[in-house]
Amino acid sequence: MSSITYDSETYDIALEDLDNLYDYDENLSVDQAQVEIGTVLPSITREIYVPSPLPEESEEEASTPKLIDGSSPHEPGVLGPHTHEGLPTCLLCTCLGTSVYCDDRELEALPPLPKQTTHFYCRYNRIKKVNRDDFANLSSLKRIDLTSNLISQIDEDAFRSLPQLQELLLRDNQIRQLPELPPTLTFIDISNNRLGRKGIKQEAFKDMIDLHHLYITDNNLDHIPLPLPESLQSLHLQNNNIQEMHEDTFCKMKDYSYIRKTLEDIRLDGNPINLSKTPYAYMCLP
């Protein structure tokens, strides 16, 4: 009998050698026989799927967009220009729309503002001086509030070049000399400073045809700053050193038919003034 050989990868043993795969002991009983059954599984070659790597994004596309910090001379920056503290203005302060709030930040100098700023609040700081360049090129600025600082000096043209400035609040400082102000102002509060006798120039408010509120309390003034614009509605001069008032301070003595309709609120309490000496000073008032 010729030997038969299987060519299968699984079975590569000659048929006559199958009897020798297991050595049985003929003397063992069936019960004592140890039977070992083996199954040879065919080998299976599996292809393991390895996903191809994703194409790498270019470094420029994958990187997170960076905020402009304002240090570039060509870009104003989303956080505004850098302050003296080395931080962008809108990171040191709070910027909401076109308003900038720098209250109570222990600042010793005014921070540079974004060019689109319309309202600026910098109260309760330690600022001592307002320089001519602090508000340069801020053509949209409408309100400046520097209440409760240590300001004792303001450059003469610090506010003059602001074409849309309407409200200026400088109360609770140490100002001795009021600089030239723009004629566009409608609201001025310079109360509780040190203006004294010479702190306000002659005819300082004459050309402010839209001025409605003028507050100069607690300044040791010895006179009422004249002339007052016709548009004025409220004048507060409490707690000064005003000792006299002329009959033409508010009215026109040569025109008895003149009525000053807009001026409705005058405060002179806290001054050593005897109003009985000028009984006609209020004749033109509503």
Image (tube, rainbow, N blue to C red):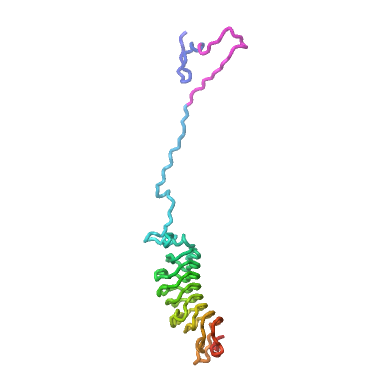
Which x, y percent locates residue 279?
A: 55, 90
| Quarter of the image where the C terminus is located | bottom right
Q: Magenta stretch: residue 77 in it?
A: no
Q: In the figure, is residue 128 to the left or right of 275?
A: left
Residue 266 appearing in the image: no
Residue 232 in the image: x percent, y percent?
A: 51, 81
Bounds of the magenta span?
20-44
**Residue 7 quadrant:** top left
Q: Main secondary structure of the magenta part?
A: loop
Q: Is residue 193 above or below residue 248?
A: above
Which residue sits at x=40%, y=71%? 132
Q: Is residue 261 left or right of residue 208?
A: right
Where residue 66 sits, quadrant-wise, is bottom left
Residue found at the far top of this picture: 27
Task: Residue 125: give x, y in percent of width and height.
Answer: 48, 66
Q: Residue at x 47, y 79 (%)?
A: 196
How many labels were placed on the picture?
A: 0
Residue at the right extreme of this rendering: 31
Q: Is residue 155 left or right of residue 256?
A: left
Q: Nearer the viewer, residue 18 or 170?
A: 170
Question: Residue most toward the left?
Answer: 73
Q: Quadrant of residue 139?
A: bottom left
Instruction: Mark yes or no: residue 71 visible.
Output: yes
Residue 223, image x and y in percent? 49, 84
272, 105: nearer the viewer: 272
Q: Is residue 52 above or below residue 28?
A: below
Identity of the residue drawn at 53% across and 11% down: 23
